[in-house]
Image: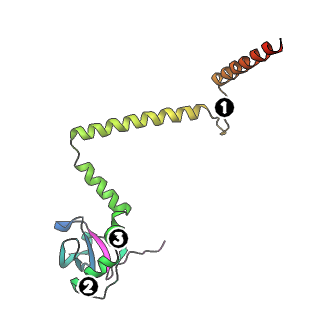
Amino acid sequence: MPFERFVQTGRIAKASAGPLKGRLVAIVDVIDQNRVLVDGPLTGVPRQEYRLSNLHLTKYRIKFPYTAPTRIVRKAWTESDLKAQWKVSPWSVKAQNICKRSQLNDFDRFKLRYAKRQRNKLLTIAFNTLKKRTKADGTPRVLKKDRRERLRAEKAKGGKKAAAKK
Protein backbone atom coordinates (compact mmCIF):
# COMPACT_ATOMS: atom_id res chain seq x y z
CA MET A 1 0.00 0.00 0.00
CA PRO A 2 1.72 3.22 -1.14
CA PHE A 3 2.03 6.24 1.10
CA GLU A 4 -0.79 8.69 0.40
CA ARG A 5 -0.59 11.39 3.07
CA PHE A 6 1.92 13.90 1.78
CA VAL A 7 2.83 17.27 3.28
CA GLN A 8 1.35 19.46 0.56
CA THR A 9 -0.74 22.56 0.01
CA GLY A 10 -4.35 21.84 0.86
CA ARG A 11 -3.68 18.81 3.09
CA ILE A 12 -5.88 18.82 6.19
CA ALA A 13 -4.08 18.01 9.44
CA LYS A 14 -5.05 17.67 13.07
CA ALA A 15 -2.98 19.61 15.60
CA SER A 16 -1.65 17.28 18.28
CA ALA A 17 0.04 19.65 20.72
CA GLY A 18 -0.05 23.18 22.01
CA PRO A 19 -3.00 25.52 22.25
CA LEU A 20 -4.45 24.21 18.96
CA LYS A 21 -4.58 20.58 20.13
CA GLY A 22 -7.46 18.69 18.50
CA ARG A 23 -8.26 21.32 15.87
CA LEU A 24 -8.22 20.81 12.12
CA VAL A 25 -5.98 23.01 10.00
CA ALA A 26 -5.17 23.26 6.31
CA ILE A 27 -1.54 23.41 5.16
CA VAL A 28 -1.17 26.56 3.10
CA ASP A 29 2.58 26.49 2.45
CA VAL A 30 5.63 24.43 3.34
CA ILE A 31 8.29 26.62 4.97
CA ASP A 32 10.99 23.98 5.37
CA GLN A 33 11.23 20.30 6.27
CA ASN A 34 10.14 20.95 9.86
CA ARG A 35 7.61 23.79 9.60
CA VAL A 36 4.49 24.63 7.60
CA LEU A 37 2.14 27.58 7.30
CA VAL A 38 -1.32 26.52 8.47
CA ASP A 39 -4.73 28.14 8.43
CA GLY A 40 -8.03 27.02 9.92
CA PRO A 41 -10.63 29.63 9.01
CA LEU A 42 -13.62 27.56 10.14
CA THR A 43 -11.97 25.97 13.20
CA GLY A 44 -10.80 29.20 14.80
CA VAL A 45 -7.12 28.81 13.94
CA PRO A 46 -5.42 31.98 12.68
CA ARG A 47 -2.80 31.69 9.93
CA GLN A 48 0.50 30.80 11.56
CA GLU A 49 3.62 28.72 11.30
CA TYR A 50 3.36 25.27 12.93
CA ARG A 51 5.80 22.42 13.47
CA LEU A 52 5.20 19.27 11.46
CA SER A 53 6.01 17.13 14.49
CA ASN A 54 2.90 18.60 16.14
CA LEU A 55 0.59 17.75 13.22
CA HIS A 56 -1.12 14.52 12.24
CA LEU A 57 -1.89 14.43 8.52
CA THR A 58 -5.35 13.23 7.52
CA LYS A 59 -6.51 11.63 4.29
CA TYR A 60 -8.46 14.76 3.35
CA ARG A 61 -7.20 17.40 0.95
CA ILE A 62 -8.86 20.52 -0.39
CA LYS A 63 -7.91 22.30 -3.58
CA PHE A 64 -6.71 25.89 -3.43
CA PRO A 65 -3.74 27.72 -4.92
CA TYR A 66 -0.31 27.85 -3.34
CA THR A 67 -0.18 30.46 -0.48
CA ALA A 68 -3.85 31.38 -0.95
CA PRO A 69 -5.33 34.02 1.35
CA THR A 70 -7.64 33.01 4.19
CA ARG A 71 -10.83 33.91 2.29
CA ILE A 72 -9.96 31.45 -0.50
CA VAL A 73 -9.06 28.73 2.01
CA ARG A 74 -12.40 29.34 3.75
CA LYS A 75 -14.28 29.10 0.45
CA ALA A 76 -12.53 25.84 -0.54
CA TRP A 77 -13.15 24.41 2.95
CA THR A 78 -16.89 25.11 2.82
CA GLU A 79 -17.24 23.84 -0.76
CA SER A 80 -15.58 20.54 0.08
CA ASP A 81 -18.01 19.96 3.00
CA LEU A 82 -15.06 18.87 5.10
CA LYS A 83 -16.84 19.26 8.43
CA ALA A 84 -19.43 16.60 7.55
CA GLN A 85 -16.79 14.23 6.16
CA TRP A 86 -14.65 14.61 9.27
CA LYS A 87 -17.60 14.10 11.62
CA VAL A 88 -18.30 10.59 10.28
CA SER A 89 -14.65 9.51 10.02
CA PRO A 90 -13.51 6.78 12.45
CA TRP A 91 -10.78 9.09 13.76
CA SER A 92 -13.30 11.75 14.76
CA VAL A 93 -15.74 9.23 16.25
CA LYS A 94 -12.97 7.75 18.39
CA ALA A 95 -11.91 11.21 19.58
CA GLN A 96 -15.52 12.04 20.52
CA ASN A 97 -15.84 8.78 22.47
CA ILE A 98 -12.62 9.50 24.34
CA CYS A 99 -13.94 12.96 25.20
CA LYS A 100 -17.24 11.49 26.45
CA ARG A 101 -15.43 8.94 28.60
CA SER A 102 -13.18 11.56 30.15
CA GLN A 103 -16.23 13.52 31.29
CA LEU A 104 -17.89 10.61 33.14
CA ASN A 105 -18.23 10.93 36.89
CA ASP A 106 -17.84 8.08 39.36
CA PHE A 107 -21.48 6.99 39.24
CA ASP A 108 -21.54 7.04 35.42
CA ARG A 109 -18.42 4.84 35.34
CA PHE A 110 -20.15 2.44 37.75
CA LYS A 111 -23.29 2.30 35.56
CA LEU A 112 -21.15 1.66 32.47
CA ARG A 113 -19.25 -1.13 34.22
CA TYR A 114 -22.51 -2.71 35.45
CA ALA A 115 -24.10 -2.55 31.98
CA LYS A 116 -21.02 -4.16 30.43
CA ARG A 117 -21.13 -6.92 33.02
CA GLN A 118 -24.80 -7.63 32.24
CA ARG A 119 -24.12 -7.65 28.49
CA ASN A 120 -21.17 -10.01 28.91
CA LYS A 121 -23.28 -12.35 31.04
CA LEU A 122 -25.91 -12.60 28.29
CA LEU A 123 -23.26 -13.14 25.64
CA THR A 124 -21.61 -15.89 27.69
CA ILE A 125 -24.91 -17.72 28.17
CA ALA A 126 -25.72 -17.51 24.45
CA PHE A 127 -22.22 -18.67 23.49
CA ASN A 128 -22.27 -21.61 25.90
CA THR A 129 -25.66 -22.82 24.66
CA LEU A 130 -24.43 -22.67 21.06
CA LYS A 131 -21.24 -24.43 22.05
CA LYS A 132 -23.20 -27.13 23.86
CA ARG A 133 -25.45 -27.70 20.85
CA THR A 134 -22.66 -28.14 18.27
CA LYS A 135 -20.03 -30.82 17.85
CA ALA A 136 -16.36 -30.03 17.25
CA ASP A 137 -16.83 -30.48 13.50
CA GLY A 138 -19.71 -27.95 13.43
CA THR A 139 -22.63 -30.37 13.05
CA PRO A 140 -25.60 -30.03 15.43
CA ARG A 141 -25.59 -32.23 18.51
CA VAL A 142 -28.80 -33.90 19.78
CA LEU A 143 -29.02 -33.54 23.54
CA LYS A 144 -30.86 -35.89 25.94
CA LYS A 145 -33.26 -33.09 26.72
CA ASP A 146 -34.17 -32.83 23.01
CA ARG A 147 -34.68 -36.63 22.75
CA ARG A 148 -37.00 -36.65 25.77
CA GLU A 149 -39.11 -33.82 24.38
CA ARG A 150 -39.34 -35.54 20.98
CA LEU A 151 -40.43 -38.86 22.64
CA ARG A 152 -43.07 -37.08 24.74
CA ALA A 153 -44.43 -35.39 21.63
CA GLU A 154 -44.55 -38.72 19.77
CA LYS A 155 -46.30 -40.44 22.70
CA ALA A 156 -48.85 -37.66 22.83
CA LYS A 157 -49.55 -38.04 19.11
CA GLY A 158 -49.41 -41.87 19.26
CA GLY A 159 -51.79 -42.02 22.24
CA LYS A 160 -54.39 -39.96 20.37
CA LYS A 161 -54.02 -42.13 17.26
CA ALA A 162 -54.43 -45.36 19.27
CA ALA A 163 -57.56 -43.99 20.96
CA ALA A 164 -58.99 -42.97 17.58
CA LYS A 165 -58.44 -46.49 16.12
CA LYS A 166 -60.43 -48.21 18.93
Q: Say which element carries label 1.
A: loop
Question: Does 144 lie within the magenta span?
Answer: no
| Residue drawn 66% across the image and 21% down it | 149
Residue at left offset 65%, top offset 39%: 138
Q: Up-down: is 18 above or below 76?
A: above
- In the picture of the structure, the residue carrying the numbered disc 3 is 58
What secondary structure predominates along the stretch shown in magenta?
A: loop
Q: Secondary structure at mark 2?
A: helix
Depth order, front residue of 161/66: 161
Bin the neighbour count of mark 1 within 10 Å (Cα to Cα): few under 14, some 14-19, many 20 and up.
some
Q: Is residue 164 above or below residue 61?
A: above
Residue 161: image quadrant is: top right
Q: Secondary structure at mark 3?
A: strand
x and y, in percent, of residue 28 in the image = 26, 82
- Amino acid type for the residue under numbered disc 3: Thr
- Magenta stretch in the rendered image: 1-15
- Above or below 103: residue 53: below
Question: Which residue position is annotated with label 2?
Answer: 72
Q: How is the image coloured?
A: rainbow
Which amino acid, by three-letter code, is at mark 1? Arg
Type of the residue with mark 2: Ile
Name the residue at the right extreme.
165
